[in-house]
Each structure stands twice: as structure tokens, then as C-alpha cells.
Amino acid sequence: MEEKLNIAFIQANLNWEDAEANRKLFSEEIDKISEDVELIILPEMFTTGFSMKAEKLAEETEADTLTWMRKIAKEKSSAVTGSVIISENSNYYNRLFFVFPDGSYKLYDKRHTFTLAKEDQTYTAGTERLIVDYNGWKICPLICYDLRFPVWARNTVDYDLLLYVANWPEKRVNAWDALLKARAIENMAYCIGVNRTGEDGDGYVYNGHSAAYDPLGIELTELNRSDEFIAEFSIEKESLKEVRTKLKFLQDRDSFTLN
């Protein structure tokens, strides 16, 4: 079990509905990341932006972007995660891939599709939460609108790290800031949110505010949060253990069934 996990995330201005350009963009940014990074996090729909043109943009699972993620993971000896528009069995999914350094992967389909943007009319909602075991860390990856639903993120399995990839617009960024911090505190886990910047083809403006919080809600990445940037930082298992041992809040959590 590794006591420390070295993480990098990339906050970028995505090229609207241009997968090839975005893969090139992220390849160039990932080249700048330190060799000791073990997990690289990209935004939601990082190849296209938050588009509802799934019929035009969707890939099969075993297609260009997953092939690219596998290549990056092997070259960097790091896991890579982010979400992509996927077509499968006549349905479209906002699908997160968690790709391991050996090229294997796990996937998570966004549970809460964003009705305000009619995402629910385009994409099929997922039904299963994913817990990834990686380098001795239990990681729960979720997507954007999932952030507003604390029951879905509730830490009933003692995961160590909760992460959200997102295209969260500037006009509601105060909610993003508050909820990311709240999810860390209430779940007594590290919490990371990776958003985009810039303006998309539908006229929505994004100002980033990507951030990482420790289990007490203290921010680990104090950066100029509206710019494009790469953040590198570490999270520590011993610090997490100390907080949970001293403050046994998770042991007092309510029991419930999610339907």
C-alpha cells in the first residue's frame, strides 16, 4: 500500500466538438507533468466539451480516445481518467474511463444527467457507482451534476478519494466551490474537482475553479483558479487515517437504502 499518491489535474479551454484537437492539446499538457505522478485527471467530455450532439460525436468504447488514454497511461506509468461521449447498444453515455498504467480500465456512466441542458434526453443514465482500487487507494470517480446529490457520493465503503470531472459553468461556480468542500468534509475523504475554462459552442462560459480538498475541507491547491493550468500535488494516507481515527464521524452515519 502506498502512503502517498501523486496526482496531477489539467484545467483547460476545450476545443468545441473537436476530439482530435483536444487529444493533441492534452498530449502536449501531459508531456509537462512530472514523472512521479501516478494519477492524471482530465475534465468531463474532455474531447468535445459538453455537447448534446451525441449522434455526431460519439465513439465506440474501443475507439480513438480510449486507445489514446491507454497510450498515455503506459508512457507516463500513470493512471488517466476523464469522461467521453460513448455509443453502445444504440444508447449514448457520458462515460468516465479510469485507465490503469497497464492499459486495463474501468468505467463509470454518469448517474445524474443534467436535465437543465436536456442531457437526460440525449444520454442514458448509469445505474452503478464505481470504486477503483489503485496503488492501495480506494477512489470513487463521479461526473459533474453528480456533485449536487450527496446520497450518491455517500461514503459507505470507506473510500479514500472522491473525484469529480466537470463542465461546470461560471454562473453557478459558487455552488461548485461549496459542494466540493462539503463532499470532502461529510465523507471524511480527499475530494478533487476538475473543471474546464473558456466558452463553449453553445455560449456557456466556464471559469475553472478546479480544486482539491483534504478530509477537513482545507484546500490543497491554492492557484489562480480561472486560468488554464496544471496542478500537481500529493495526498497522504497517514493524514487521512489520523483524521478518521480522531474524528469518528463516519461511524455515526445514518443507514439507508438508495433506490
Image (cartoon, rainbow, N blue to C red):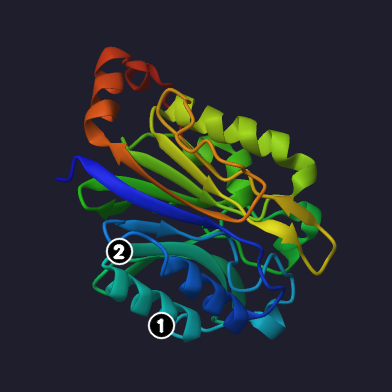
Which of the pair 137/154 is nearer the observer?
Answer: 137
Q: Which residue is mark 1?
A: 67
Find residue 250 and report its horizontal and vertical position in percent. Answer: 36, 22
Q: Secondary structure at mark 1?
A: helix
Number of disc labels: 2
Residue 165 lies, in percent from the top left, at 54, 54
Q: Is residue 258 visible?
A: no
Q: Residues within 10 Å of mark 1 (few under 14, many from 20)?
A: few
Quadrant (top left, top right, bottom left, bottom right) of the N terminus = top left
- Please tell me which residue is depicted at 53% across the width and 45% down the height of the picture: 193
- Identity, as a three-letter code, of the amino acid under mark 2: Ser
Q: Nearer the N terminus, badge 1 or badge 2?
A: 1
Q: Is residue 214 left or right of residue 165?
A: left
Q: Is residue 143 visible?
A: yes
Residue designated by label 2: 78
- Does residue 197 appear left or right of residue 67 in this picture? right
- Tell which of 70 and 61 is nearer to you: 70
- Spot occupied by residue 134 in the image (x, y as percentages of width and height): 26, 54
